[in-house]
Image (tube, rainbow, N blue to C red):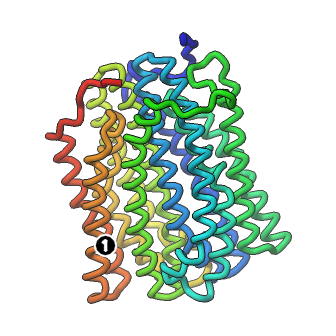
Amino acid sequence: MNKSRQAIDITQGVIWKQLLAFFFPLWFGTFFQQLYNTVDTVVVGRFVSTTALAAVGSTGVIANLTVGIFTGLSSGAVVAIAQRYGARMDTEVYKSVHTAMLLSVVVGAFFTIVGFALTPWSLRAMDTTPEALPDAILYLRIYFLGMIPNVIYNMGTGVLRAVGDSKRPLYFLIAASLCNIVLDLLLVVVFHMGVLGVAIATVCSQILSAVLVVISLMAASGETYHLSLRQLAFHAQPLKAIMAIGVPTALQSVMYSFSNIVIQAAINSFGTNAVAAWTAYGKMDILFWMTLTAMSQALTTFTGQNYGAGKYDRLKQGVRVSLAMTAGFTVAISAVMFLLARPILSIFTPDPDVLEIGVGMVRFLAPCYITYILVELLPGAIRGAGKSMVPMLISVFGVCALRLLWLFTVVPAYHTIETVEMSYPITWVVTSVSIFIYYRFGKWLKPATT
């Protein structure tokens, strides 16, 4: 198959310019994706009640667990397609796209059924406060009804990112976010539907984003990544490549989310105000996480294409450049959050008790963000080279196992919110050192065989 190549080739050119040109659309895309739940949080916190805010917040870690799985699988598709795109293997790109999109439908259907059925059990297992439990169950069950479009969107944008297109996913998310905001205000403020209204708004927005990304792939006539619904099928080699990267990455995300579920359960033990404060803080610190996620995704695509093209020195230079830029972004974000903690948190809740707890959380954790950047960026680069197992094992031990050990041993002995929060910087430092050692001395950069 010899198709035209109109997407972005990032195997040549000025590295920092290419990374930033790719980073900013991804950053804004992540911003609008996170805007779904953030707008939900603002609306319920301002127009419903603190209990409703706690209910929506209690579902966040479970929603993130499922999204993490989809993102992990889509990262497998990004790497498989980017490597083949960089190596000019057009027929294999075409097969990989159709394998990935069919996989998204199957995975989405599975999680719709399982998630809907297990919602009450999972929220009770997290010790969700009794007053927040009914609304939390309602919100999460409706959220799971939107799993298929959610996975299709994540996989479809992964396909576009793999070939260097980060702008159209941004446009789709802007449209979906505007839809979410309008429906939130309409259903909650006008029709007084409460948590039910924000849940419906979120699912409708996910459906819109999925439809837009599918239309864009189907309209890419003449491109190697053109999607034809009649050609959807599982192709053995692309499926193997996607799963080889995607499954370890998804498993890593699952373990991250599981440790965060345990943290959420620990926060729940401090009462509704603490849960509401943790929810508001989580929406505030998304600025840091979406910056890191966008740079990691940009670096994975950059690494994948350059690895496929055999440009290993350029690959390593890209890693160094991305680390320097991310460190600068992180210092700036941490300073802003530390200094403006109270006014920013006030956007989410006017409750003075909740604000006091939230400000303490922000000022404890924001200065520690710099210790995490290696944990995200180096595995992103290594995955781009087709290796994900060792980074997954390092992260599972350093971030997850060590964090759970802390939560189950130290926190019961010293039962304070600060002790719970301390589990983050301790595990970030240990994992950063471990992953750097592997990046520096491990045999992860070998010639591509795909």
Q: Position of residue 168 (x, y in %)?
A: 62, 34
Residue 286 image point, x, y percent: 49, 59
The image quadrant that residue 36 belongs to is bottom right
Observer able to see residue 13 = no
At 31% from the left and 56% from the top, the residue drawn is 372
Answer above or below: position of 17 versus 222. below
Question: Could you say which is closer to the camera, residue 376 or residue 382?
Answer: 382
Considering depth in this image, is 279 or 241 the residue closer to the camera?
Answer: 241
Q: Is residue 135 visible?
A: yes
Residue lying furthest left in this view?
Answer: 441
- State the residue position of label 1: 404
Kindly indicate the quadrant of the structure image that contains residue 167: top right
Q: Residues within 10 Å of mark 1 (few under 14, many from 20)?
A: some
Residue for point 25% across, 47% down: 390
In the rendered structure, the answer to whether residue 1 lies left or right of residue 292 reads: right
Residue 277 locus on image (x, y percent): 51, 77
Q: Residue at x 55, y 30 (%)?
A: 97
Q: Is residue 423 left or right of residue 170?
A: left
Which residue is pictured at 61% across the width and 56% down the height? 35
Q: Amino acid at mark 1?
A: Leu
Number of numbered discs on residues: 1
Q: Quadrant of residue 191?
A: bottom right
x then y, percent, for residue 34:
57, 56
Pick out the residue farthest to the top. 2
Which quadrant of the rendered structure holds the C terminus?
top left
- SS state under label 1: helix
Q: Quadrant of the N terminus?
A: top right
Question: Residue lying farthest right?
Answer: 191
- The relative height of residue 391 versus residue 228 in the rendered view (above or below) is below
